[in-house]
Image (cartoon, rainbow, N blue to C red):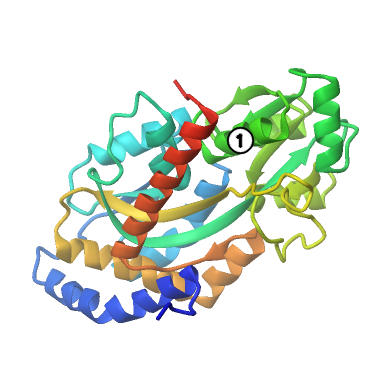
Amino acid sequence: MASSHSPREALATDGLRAGAALAALVVAAAAQAQFPDRPLRLIVPFAPGGNIDLTARTIAPGMSQALGQPVVVDNRSGAGGRIGAEVAAKSAPDGYTLLLGSSGSLTINPVFGTNVSYDPLRDFTPTTLVSITPLVVTVHPSVPVKTIAGLIALAKKQPGRLAVASAGIGSTTHIANEIFQIEAGVKFIHVPFKGSGPALVDLVGGHADLMFDQLSTSSPHVRAGRLRALALTTSKRSALLPEIPTIEEAGVRGYEVETWTGVFLPANAPKEIVARIWKAAYDTLAQPSVREAFERLGSEPLRSTPEALALRMRNEMVKWTKVKQAVNIKLD
């Protein structure tokens, strides 16, 4: 009989079922050499100020408290998250280097890129999913459109003249706008940055015309009137900006893109250490203050087992491979 639970409810249920087994490994970790006995670094493969960076800084304090050592955010930006992911993949699997991986760096880049030196399924050990965030299409107020239909009409009238900023080649924000261009039949000029933070600075400054960015980082600019929101990239609206329709509602049928994040270690990390990191992140995500912080950002905090996160990655890579075959996007 098919389950009536949603995939996200299943993630939570799986987490509860596996909790006892993972907690037992945490106890075993105590027998190791007092791990951790020095600060840990959490690599963020994007520049400060973007969604992935804000996510890391939301969970780092709670993880620090749980582990009894500082968890220091280390920004290693560039190549749509590829550079930071490469640094993490090559780090010692001793538990002191973590990666806040995302859909861009771990499922999109490896599928669409041709110069990716790491295998996301082979070179990383997943712990828990952290959050899911919709993207929002925003334009600078000088762009004379208020709807997706208006944007499409303007882009068709002025092909190749509107500049779309992104968090970097191969990032979710890049792929989101490439798929939109293909499905809407329009052409933008792509301007990649080393993270959504720098991209937003240029967009707000009027040096770019539009951007597909995570709601968490764009919403403050929308509320302040520095940017105009046109539509969300997900299949449902957000409680943060309930008046903003989805791209599908606006007429581009079947369009759906979102960003997820998760905590990873390099491959071959000891199981006891993986369990200790998993529990620190899992318990942090249960804290009401942390969940409220994510909700204020427009993100949905989620927890999972390592197995559920690995399954999500495999499923998404299958999805993006099909998209690549259909739209022929190349990143290198």
Q: Please state which amino acid type lies under the numbered disc 1.
A: Ile
62 is higher (above) or lower (below) than 85: below
Identify residue for label 1: 179
How packed mark 1 is, by other alpha carbons closer than 10 Å (few <14, some 14-19, many 20 or more), is some
Q: Is residue 91 left or right of residue 234?
A: left
> Compared with residue 289, is residue 204 higher up or lower down, i.e. above or below?
above
Residue farthest right in this picture:
144
Question: Percent position (x, y) of residue 205?
Answer: 77, 30
- In what quadrant of the picture does the N terminus appear? bottom left
Locate residue 76 relative to residue 175 in the image: left or right.
left
Q: Nearer the viewer, residue 37 or 280?
A: 280
| Picture residue at 17% right of the left edge, 73% below the top | 25
Whether 204 is drawn above or below 55: the answer is above
Residue found at x 81% / y 24% = 156
The quarter of the picture where residue 79 lies is top left
Q: Nearer the viewer, residue 145 or 66?
A: 145
SS of the residue at dot 1? helix
Q: Nearer the viewer, residue 116 or 274?
A: 116
